[in-house]
Amino acid sequence: MGSSAGIPIKLLYEAEGMKVTVEMKNGEIYRGLLLTAEDTMNMSLSDVVRTARNGHVSKLPSVYLRGGGVRFVALPELLKNAPVFRKVVKLKERAEAERQAKAGTKRKRE
C-alpha cells in the first residue's frame, strides 16, 4: 500500500478479503470477494456475480476490473470502524479547533 494513497484508496485496501459491489461507468455491476486492489483502483474479484446493463445476470469465477472504468464501489458497513477513519476524525477535530481559535482572535480585535 503506497503512502501517497488518499483515504478512499486506503479504505479500498481495508476491504480486501470482503464482499464488495462495483458499478462500472458502462453500467455493469460486479459483486464479489475483493482479492486485491491497487492505487489506480484496479481490482481483482473472485466468486463474482455480474449484472449487465440489460439486467442479464451471470456468474464468473474471477474478474479484473480496470480502475479507470469504475464509477463507484460499495463497501461493507464493517469498514465504518476502520482505523483510517480514526485518523480522519482527528484531523477534522484539529482543523475545527484551529478554525475556532482563529475566529476567536478576530472577534477580540474588533
Image: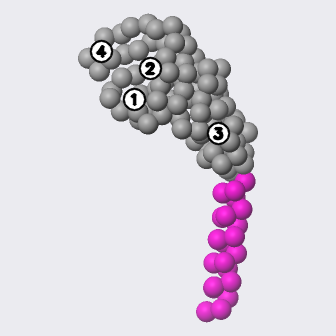
Pointer 4 residue? 55
Q: Is residue 107 magenta?
A: yes
Neighbourhood count class around disc 3 (C-alpha, 10 Å): few under 14, some 14–19, many 20 upward: many
Give the Cα separation between the discs numbered 3 and 1: 20 Å
Pointer 3 residue? 10
Neighbourhood count class around disc 4 (C-alpha, 10 Å): few under 14, some 14–19, many 20 upward: few
Give the Cα separation between the discs numbered 3 and 4: 31 Å
Q: Do tag 1 and tag 2 residues touch (Cβ < 8 Å)?
A: yes
Q: Is residue 107 above or below residue 9?
A: below
Could you tell whether 40 is left or right of 7 in the image? left
Amino acid type at image mark 4: Gly
Amino acid type at image mark 3: Lys
Q: Which contiguous range is marked in magenta?
A: 90-110
Give the Cα separation between the discs numbered 1 and 2: 8 Å
Q: Is residue 35 above or below residue 3?
A: above
Amino acid type at image mark 2: Tyr
In terms of secondary structure, what is the magenta stretch mainly? Answer: helix
Query: Which one is earlier in the sequence, the residue at label 2 or at label 4?
Result: 2
Q: Quadrant of residue 8?
A: top right
Give the residue at x 73% y 39%. Answer: 83
Pointer 1 residue? 24
Neighbourhood count class around disc 1 (C-alpha, 10 Å): few under 14, some 14–19, many 20 upward: some
Q: Is residue 36 magenta?
A: no
Q: Helix, strand, or loop for circle 1?
A: strand
Q: Quadrant of residue 51?
A: top left
Query: Which one is earlier in the sequence, the residue at label 4 or at label 1?
Result: 1
Q: Quadrant of residue 92?
A: bottom right
Q: Position of residue 88 (x, y in %)?
A: 67, 50
Give the Cα separation between the discs numbered 2 and 3: 20 Å
Can the viewer see residue 56 in this picture?
yes
User: Which quarter of the image is occupied by the C terminus?
Assistant: bottom right
